[in-house]
Amino acid sequence: MKGTMITSTANRQMKNLTLLMKKAKERKKQGVFVVEGVRMVEEAPLEQIKAVYVSERFMQENRYPKLTEKLGGGTHTFETVADPVFRLISDTQTPQGILAVVKRPEYRLSDCLGGGSPKLLILESIQDPGNLGTMLRTGEGAGVSGVIFNDTTADLFNPKTIRSTMGSIYRVPFWESPDLKQTLEELKSSGIRLYAAHLNGTVDYDEPDYTGPCGFLIGNEGNGLSSDLTAMADVCVRIPMEGQVESLNAAVSAALFLYEAARQRRRKQ
């Protein structure tokens, strides 16, 4: 911990934190992102933490000594920030009083394939950061081998996305495809069967056999999957609806597919 407290938002580090919170371009340029809250800082891989900032109030809490011990007993420098300044730079309504700048993990497509029988979540132009983060978290829970998305999907390192992952951002391999159609061709040629979530699907989501290498295609919240990507699927799969509901939230749809695949694989073991 440094002796000098940061007391102004005009401070160089505070200005940079604000930039990193708001600008995807800046996060990409610096190769870092910002996480907030005790759990998100605790779970960050030690070697990826670049800086830690704590509020005055947090310094006085019982959690502070435990956290410093957990973060390497002094390996990382803690910067103290005046409470009013911390509230201004925080991206949450009720800040916990701690945030960290973390190095972005880097993966390749091969990292998402895992070993044995890959189970992929493939996203096209998901726009809501909360949906994207929830899908990553759900993916980890359902044992996904990786998440693939195109460059018009929401920024994975948006603070809202990061919060929604609840720590899964540190553990689930992901890859941004520069050309999703070409990526799907590569996956198909390597023996991965593709299933598209589609309102005009020909079979119910719990009918196909997902125990082999597979990928689930989930489209944009408003428009669904593009016709190009839909045409690349081996099977278009629907989620049966009752009442007057036309479709489910994209993250909920992803959860149904991933957990059905997980259920089938458990039964097969």
Image: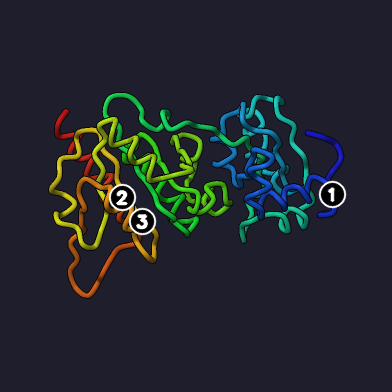
Q: Residues within 10 Å of mark 3 (few under 14, many from 20)?
A: many
Query: Label 3 near label 1: C-beta < 8 Å?
Result: no
Residue drawn at point x = 44 percent, y = 36 percent: 172
Mark 3 vs mark 2, CA separation in Å: 14 Å
Task: Give the mark nearest the N terminus, 3 or 2.
Answer: 3
Residue 185 in picture, x, y percent from top left = 33, 39
Depth check, mark 3 against mark 2: the one in front is 3
Q: Residue furthest bottom?
A: 244
Residue 118 position within the rendered picture, expressed as x and y whole percent measured from the top left: 30, 32
Q: Are marks 3 and 2 in contact (CB under 8 Å)?
A: no
Look at the picture and state if 45 lies above or below 169. Answer: above
- Residue 190 screen position, x and y as percent: 29, 30
- Rendered position, 41 above or below 164: above
Residue depicted at 77% across the width and 55% down the height: 85
Q: From mark 1 to mark 2, how far is it between C-alphas?
A: 43 Å
**Residue that badge 2 annotates:** 255
Which amino acid type is shown beneath numbered disc 2? Ala
Eyeballing the image, is 171 above or below 22?
above
**Vertical arrangement, residue 72 with respect to residue 91, above or below:** above
Point 72% across, 42% down: residue: 53
Name the mark nearer the viewer: 1 or 3: 3
Q: Amino acid at mark 3?
A: Gly
**Which secondary structure, mark 2?**
helix
Question: What residue is disc 1 on?
Answer: 11
Using the numbered discs, state the Cα–Cα distance from disc 1 to disc 3 in whole angstroms: 42 Å
Which residue is denoted by mark 3 in the rendering?
A: 219
Its colouring scheme is: rainbow
Tell me if mark 2 has few (under 14), some (14-19) or many (20+) residues whose alpha carbon lies within 10 angstroms of its own. Answer: many
Local secondary structure at mark 3: loop
The answer to which of marks 1 and 2 sits earlier in the sequence is: 1
